[in-house]
Image (spheres, helix red, strand yellow):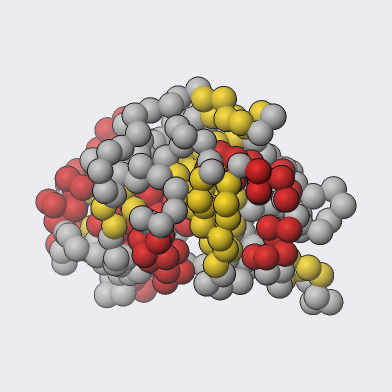
Amino acid sequence: MKRILMIATGGTIASKETGEGLAPVISSEELLSCVPEVASVCDVTAVQPFNLDSTNVYAPHWLKIAEIIEDNYNLYDGFVVTHGTDTMAYTAAALSYLIQGSRKPIVLTGSQKSVYSRDTDARRNLADAFLFCADERAYGVRIVFDGSVILGTRAKKTRTRSFNAFASIDFPAIAVMRDGRPYYFIEGEKPVGEPIFYHKLNRNVFVLKMIPGLSADIFDYFDDRCDGLVIESFGAGGLPYYEDGAFFNRLAGFIKKGKTAVLTTQAEHEGSSIDKYAVGRKLRECGRVLEARCMTLEAAVAKLMWILSFAKGAEAEILFNAPVDRDIY
């Protein structure tokens, strides 16, 4: 029987009505009591490092989850992280970079409704997460939600109410859960040996979402505050020429300070392509502008935070372009 450590962090799955709205107050023991069927396939131990709405979960919490997994890696066969849905994709991406080459599964799940709601999706998602985690072929960071098994680097929350809240962006879901077992579309090769754990993230990363008419003066805010900039541009990617090319000049100045810039797109699918249009090709004159291509925004942000914790310049570019768990191709 597999030994699994459940790391409960809060979220809707652990929420009750408080009079001021839903808030996470349900303990890990209460959650486990709602899925007694998993006791027949795995022996579960639970810890609860925090109990938060995932809107409040960010880099220090990602590092804490990774620390718990590292401290217990040799004691358990897998890990299930219960988590709020709003930032689950960011946490999954961050864990994919903080814990690389894991031969053991690290499964995130949650729900759109509290585990105590009559028509909840929580019990199914939680049971599926444990059942997938107990599967001999499972490994790496995955989200299990509404019957889909999604790579941690490929997940995005695309719906706020429906049970099928998560999509796998520009890459297939690797499996589906049916009748308590995974049916794989893409199985992959399980890593061997020990995983590599990282212990730092650079939080000085800013996402600039372009809107028509935005002034390049926005650089005044983050020029001296940020080490990395992810630009969510339009379409295939580029910057506007208006204001006498001010955006290009300010971006070039940002990069000359030794900072790292990544271009991505606001379009959810098919990724960026800097060289397609003149507004993109001109970016080549600004210096080292990295391109997210088909990466999700969540993965691009988390990867940049990971890289900039120990590298910059040419080394950062090499690391950003190197695939980690199929985050880029």
Q: Which residue is farthest top?
A: 185
Q: Is residue 74 left or right of residue 281?
A: right
Q: Is residue 181 left or right of residue 168?
A: right
Q: Residue at x 45, y 44 (%)?
A: 105
Q: Residue at x 28, y 60 (%)?
A: 198
Residue 309 seen from this side = yes
Instruction: Identify which residue, 62 or 39, lies in the foreground.
Output: 39
Q: Residue at x 70, y 60 (%)?
A: 31
Residue 278 seen from this side = no
Task: Using the image, determine if residue 167 lies above or below residue 251.
Answer: above
Q: In the rendering, at what x and y percent does residue 267 appear?
A: 49, 39
Q: In the rendering, at what x and y percent does residue 44 appear?
A: 58, 55
Q: In the rendering, at what x and y percent does residue 220 appear?
A: 33, 73
Q: Which residue is farthest left?
A: 314
Task: Using the image, determine if residue 186 lies above or below residue 193.
Answer: above
Q: In the rendering, at what x and y percent does residue 9 appear?
A: 57, 65
For residue 313, which quarter of the picture? bottom left
Q: Residue at x 42, y 65 (%)?
A: 68
Instruction: Identify which residue, 211 or 123, lies in the foreground.
Output: 123
